[in-house]
Amino acid sequence: MKLSSLILLTLAVSTCALPPQKKKAEIDNRISQLQERENRQTQRDCKSKCASSIAQKAAAEAKAAQAAQNAAGAQAAHMVKTQLAEKALQAAKAAEAALAGKQAVVEQLQQEVKEAEAVVAENTASVHQQQAAVNSGIAAAQQSTAQDPIGQEALRTSY
């Protein structure tokens, strides 16, 4: 606006030397040219502002889409991690159950081993007692056999 005022003043001063009708026609001509130039400039500004506005809106939408995509990616990753954690927990529970079952089997086998060892100890003691009895019987038989001639002689003499 200041530029057009300056140009108008310059034209008015430069045309002072011309005749009044010619001055007026030239001034009107210059004014219309300046107005056309301003109109064209305003249209260009509007177009560039509109294009700039469209570009800014597109950039804002792109940023929003990127933020939404990042959020969706983070949420999907969280969901996957949660599902994997749940599966790991289920697997751990299954492993604990299997371990508990195997521990029960081991405890049962240990109890059976203790019982078998007790039976072996009883049988060993019984074998030792029987061996001692056999040894006593053998000793008695040997003694009896050794004393048999004496006994037979005693019997003979007593008849």
Image: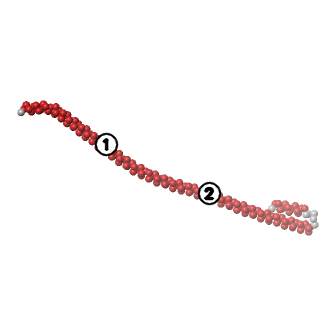
Q: Earlier in the sequence, mark 2 or mark 1?
A: 2
Q: Where is residue 156 in the image (x, y as percent from the top left)?
A: 8, 32
Residue 74 vertical position relative to residue 146 in the rendered view, above or below: below
Numbered tag placed on residue 117 in the rendering = 1
Q: Specify few, some or many for label 2: CA neighbours under 10 Å numbering under 14, 14-19, or 20 or more.
A: few
Measure the alpha-carbon separation of dots 2 and 1: 73 Å
Left or right of 145: which side holds 115?
Answer: right
Q: Where is residue 92 in the image (x, y as percent from the top left)?
A: 46, 51
Residue 146 vertical position relative to residue 30 in the rendered view, above or below: above
Numbered tag placed on residue 12 in the rendering = none
Q: Which residue is drawn at 62% across and 57% down?
A: 67
- Residue placed farthest to the left in the image? 159
Label 2 residue SS: helix
- The label nearer to you, 2 versus 1, is 1
Residues tagged 2 and 1 counted as in contact (Cβ below 8 A): no
Q: Specify few, some or many for label 1: CA neighbours under 10 Å numbering under 14, 14-19, or 20 or more.
A: few
Total marks in image: 2
Residue 49, image quadrant: bottom right
Left or right of 47: which side holds 106?
Answer: left
Image quadrant holding the N terminus, namely bottom right
> What's the residue type where badge 2 is placed?
Ala
Q: Residue at x 31, y 45 (%)?
A: 115
26 and 84: which is toward the camera: 84
Q: Name the residue under label 2.
A: 67
> What's the residue type where badge 1 is placed?
Glu
Image quadrant holding the C terminus, namely top left
1 and 48: which is toward the camera: 48
Residue 155 vertical position relative to residue 67 in the rendered view, above or below: above
Residue 136, image quadrant: top left
